[in-house]
Every structure is written in structure tokens, then in C-alpha cells.
Image (cartoon, rainbow, N blue to C red):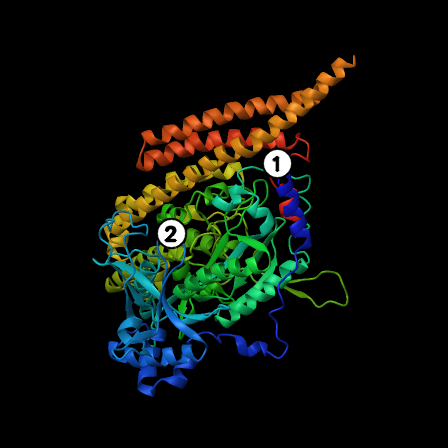
Amino acid sequence: MTANAVRLAAIKDAQSFEGPAPFFDVAEKTGEIFGANVFSLAVMQKRLPKAVFKSVAATIQNGEKLDPAVADLVAAAMKDWAMERGVTHYAHVFYPLTGLTAEKHDSFLEPVGDGTAIWEFSGKTLIQGEPDASSFPNGGIRATFEARGYTGWDVQSPAYILENANGNTLCIPTIFVSMTGEALDHKTPLLRSQAAMAAQAQRVLALFGHQDIDNVVSYCGPEQEYFLIDSSFVNARPDLLNAGRTLFGAKPPKGQEFDDHYFGAIPERVLAFMHDTERALFKLGIPAKTRHNEVAPGQFEIAPVFERANLASDHQQLLMSTFRSIAKQHGMECLFHEKPFAGVNGSGKHVNFSFGNGNQGNFLNPGDNPHDNAQFLVFCAAIIRAVHLHGGLLRLTVASAGNDHRLGANEAPPAIISIFLGDQLADVFDQIAKGGEATSSKQRGILSVGVDTLPDLAKDAGDRNRTSPFAFTGNRFEFRAAGSNQTVAAPMVIINTIMAEALDFAATEIEAAVADGSDFNDAVAALLKKIIEQHGAVIFNGNGYSEEWHAEAEQRGLKNLRTTVDALPEWLTPESKELFSTYGVFSEAELESRYEVGVEQYVMTVGVEANLTSEVARTIVLPTALRYQTELAQNVAALKAAGIEADLTTLQSVSAPLADLTAALAALDTAIAGAHAHSGIAEAAYLRDVVLTAMADVRTAADALEAVVADDLWALPTYQEMLYIR
């Protein structure tokens, strides 16, 4: 089969695909399936002795230390519940620095001396496992010959059953640490950071007179964007298969310029996929809420309800793996790369953040009159301080080779970290900056749309700003810069930690002022004025996409870390080391390891893409163009032999980009070879400055050829086909 025949077969397969048998069972009661595969508090309450249940519930709900004495009883109940549902194996699930999910499966089966076997699952096994720690990214914490690492049960994230047609598995979310105690994962620092933030938030609440202070937690509601592409097209694209993004592809005649895909009717095949994924998510206790078409053709979004940050992080990882597996059942690939297609919008994962507890509620709820809500203003001011002081860390936490292609374009926030407060809060803090006290708040209004049959609509006190990386959206902040392929644990670690520092500062300032004789309200007013005067430069309610903002941000002293290579050193600044050490989130060794892992992953990612660019261009694009050039030259020769003057325009339109491609390939190969002369961050900088530029030149020539080579010769599925045929 010729290369072009492979492309045509992919188109035919995509058009003729028949979906799997419907999962939906009309006899199934929708409301009863939520959490059906989760060993939840409700399940534990039915299966555990009362005292044991109360002990475990206190750990889950109040953050109390787990009593090891109850572990055997919990393990036995968990095993019995799982085996009733066809489970034969259990897995400690953890989240290494690959950003992916890792699992180690073991059977409940335990042989005994008489040649038989029993089904067993002990508390010790539930609490702790031992996977290999040397084969995951660790930034030098573990040498290759030092293999021991441990997983530890995260009681606050419930165990669940992963269904498979051939057997089910009990999955137990865990942390992952080295033998010497360093975090080798994303969950361990997330739990540490949440505890650090909670301790400081409780200090602030106590100052406001609260005595019934419940355990404080951070909440996360991540919006997940993704692309769905027919598997036949992906299988015919080596770049999508290996890099998750297209390294070649001419702009299609129609992209997203009509905005006709955004919130449009969901295609039938995609809707079937969504139904099946949501059913699977519901059974796993994942509160999927919203689904819709996104801006780019072939792009979609799902948004779950807010959850405790560590649970939301686990659920996000599980959501992505569920989407990938069910997409395959529907003959599609689910792409989470931040920029799989050039020229159309990439995909983000907006991290909606708030924090609070059961008794005091959401700390970021301003109420109807935020100027009178001093507690809210203190928490909000702490966020302003945190983002201003540590904007570099927030930028770092969304840094990746993939997200570099997305950040700063007219689809995602810039690499400059700023805060959008909206008209109402901006006005309140402006009053504080000018006079030290706010006396009014802009109120919600009524929107009349001029249609007699419609009721008046409630109008918010301020608009939203989609160009801001850190925007207040009514009762939470939305961190919009995160990439679709990354774990939400990473930004939540940073947000929690910088909030711990800012709340510590706020509590200390108020305590000191009151100790010196100030009235409490005066102390709060002075704190708010001080924060807004020192850190108000980070507030920007304008267009973050504009060139003018870049110049203004520089004048304000805000960092503009344009690329991952620029951002990675933020791990190792003296300020970062002091911050993470003070609040017990990262040791210096752990910071250095994350820096090393970040550099290594960037280098490997760009290196793989560079080699792929060279390979695909040499083995697919170049031969195709040469065949077409030869065919055209033969036609010209035949016309000349017949005494007819040939039009050389078409031949020249191929020959020029073909020459460009040949030269660009030679330059790329030279650039790739030159990378070996560098190491560490210097190699990453070389790849960014030299290799990515050489790759872009190859692509420019190849895409120019795609526009002129005869369609019956072109081998790679085109953007038009991949984005519109499903």
C-alpha cells in the first residue's frame, strides 16, 4: 500500500466507523450509579464497626492522624466489598514526576503450605507498598542501583474499582516517597502544602473571633479541554503517535474563524463518547458537571464540580486515563497536548481555586457588600500579595515544552502573571489604597433584554477577563495558564504554599498591631492598605493579550518568563528555597530534583520532536515532493518534445520549497548534532533557541509543499481531514 493509499484508507475508515454497543442500560437508575465503584464514607459506615468508622472519618474529614490499629479492619472490609464486585487484584496508584499515573498490581491470592490458597489483604498491605523508585524521574535523589521506594495510603482520597471486561482492580490512591523520605511524586507536596496553608488560615480565622474552626482545605475545580481525532488519522501520523502534536500541517481553508464550533451542537459520535465517559466517571465518584464544544474544531471541554484539592487531583488523573481508554472504544484518540494543531486554539486546564471549611464556608465568598466583609478582604489581599511576590513560581508550575506553544497566544494568558479582580473588587481595593477604608461596593444590577416575555436577568457587578492568568470569578480565583496535559497537583502545591506565606504575614501583622494597642479593625485596615500599596502592581484588569501590557508589566516590575527555560531556575532562587523550607513543603534536595527533572523532560521532549521532524520530513514529505517534481518535469519535457511551450509556474512552485526543505533539513540535522555539546539548562536553552528554530524552518517548507503537491500523492492526513471528519 502506498503512503497516499494509507491516508485515503484512514479517511475511509473514519467515515465508515461504527461505534461500540451502547453502554446505557434503561433499567439503570442514573442517580444510583454515582460512586457505585467507590469505597466511600457511606460504604464504610455500613461495613465498619462504629468506632473504626468514626476513627477513619475523623482522618478523612478533619485531617486527624490515621490510627494504624484500625487498618486491618478497614482492609478486610475493603477486600470483601471489592471481591463482591469481581475484583481479584489491588493496586497502589501513585503520581510520579512523569505527570502520569503509575500502578503496581498485586493479587489478593496468598498460597498456603498445603497447596491451596486464601484471599488476603492486610492493613499493613493497605497502608504501604514498595514499587521501584529508581526508574521514575527523581532528579538525582535515587541512583539507578538504589531501587527502594514506598507508597503510602492517602486515606482522604477513597479507594475505587477500575472496571475492565476481563476483570476488575481495586485502586488505592497513595503518596510515593524515597527510602530516605523525599517526595518522588506530586501528591506528597500537595498534602504538605495544604497542611501549611490550613495552619495559617486558622490563625487568621482565630483573629476574627471564630472558635469553632473546622479543618481548612483548599478546593480545586479544574476545567479540562481536549481534542478528539479519529484513530485512523492518528495511526497515519508518526508525529501525533510519538509526540502528541502535529509537527507538520498546512492551515486548512476553514479553521475556527467563524466561531461556529464553540458551544455548537455536539457531534453525535462525540456525544456518544461523552455519555460513556460520564457514566464511567459517575461510577468512580467524579462529579462531572459541564460538557460542550470548545473554540477549535475537534476540541471539547468537561468541567467537574469543586472538590478537596488532593481528591480533585486524583480525579483529574483518573479522568484523563478514562477519556483515553473510552475514546479508543469509539475509534478515536483523545489528545491532551497543549497545542496539537498549529493555527487553532490549544488546550488548557483552568484551575479554579478556593479554600474554606465546613463551619466558616468558602473564604472567597465576598457577600453582597464586600467592602464590609473584612475577613474576605484579608483573604483576598493575601492572594494579591502571594501572586505578586511569587508570580515566577506560578509561571514555573505551568512550564512545559508543550505549554510554551500555547501561552501568550490569543487563546491563553500571557507568561506574565497578573491578577484580575473585576470592577467591584478593583473599586473596593482602590478605595482602600486611597483612604485606608472602603465605604461602598458596586452592586449587581438588572439586565433588560427588550423582550416582553422574558424576565429581567441578574447582572453581575463586573465582567470577566479571559486574558488574565489569575482571575477572580465571583467566589473563587481561576488560574487559567495551566496546560491540559499536566497534573493540577503542581499548581495547587504552589498556590497553597504561597497562600501559607501570605496568610502567615497577614496574621503576624494583625497580631503585632493589636499587641501594640491598635484596635482590631484599625489593624485590619492598616494591613489591607499596606498590601495594596506594596503589591497592587500585580492587579491588571485590561487586555493581557496586548503588546502594550508587556511594556506596562515591565514598568511595574512583573516578571515575563516567556519560556520553560526561563522559568525553571525559579525552583532554585534563594526566595524559593526559604519559602518551601519554612512551610515544610520541599526540602532543598527536593527542589533541586524538580529542577533537574524539569530540565530533563524539556530536553527529552524537544529532542524527540526534533528527531521526529527530521524523520518524517526525510521519509514522507521529501520523497512525496520529489515524486511530484519528477512527474511535473516529465510533463514539461513531453510538452517540449511535442513543440509546445510549457508553463513552468507549477514546477517552480514545487522546486522552490523543495530546495528550502532540503536546506532546512541539513540545518536541522546540524542543530540536533550540536545539542550534544551542551548539558543541563544550557542544552535546554540551545534546543529552544537553535533546534526549535530549525524545526520551524523545516515545517515552513514542508507546509508550503503540502499546499502545492498533488493531493493524490500527499501522504499525511491533513488538518482539514483530521479536524472535520468524525
Q: How many marks do you count on the picture?
A: 2
Figure quadrant of the N terminus: top right
Taking 31 as reference, is 21 above or below it? Answer: above
Which residue lies under the disc numbered 2? 98
Report if residue 329 is visible in the image: yes
Residue furthest to the bottom in view is 50
In the rendered structure, the answer to whether residue 561 lies left or right of residue 718 reads left
Residue at disc 1, secondary structure: loop
Q: In the image, residue 225 lies at what x, y percent? A: 54, 54
- Image quadrant where residue 130 sits: bottom left
Residue at disc 2, secondary structure: loop
Q: In the image, residue 369 lies at what x, y percent? A: 50, 65
Which residue lies under the disc numbered 1? 250
Q: In the image, residue 418 lies at what x, y percent? A: 45, 47
Look at 31% across and 37% down and name the residue there.
Answer: 680
Label 1 crowd (10 A; few <14 / some 14-19 / many >=20): some
Report if residue 445 is visible in the image: no
User: In the depicted view, which residue is nearer to us: 399 or 639?
Assistant: 639
User: In the depicted view, which residue is nearer to us: 568 or 608?
Assistant: 608
Report the amino acid beneath label 2: Thr
Report the amino acid beneath label 1: Ala
Q: In the image, residue 120 lies at what x, y percent? A: 32, 77
- Which numbered circle lies on residue 32? none
As measured in the structure, the alpha-carbon distance from the residue carrying label 2 to the one carrying label 1 is 31 Å
In the rendered structure, the answer to whether residue 546 lies left or right of residue 490 reads right
- For marks 2 and 1, the one nearer the N-term is 2
User: In the depicted view, which residue is nearer to us: 460 or 371?
Assistant: 460
Look at 54% across and 61% down and name the residue there.
Answer: 326
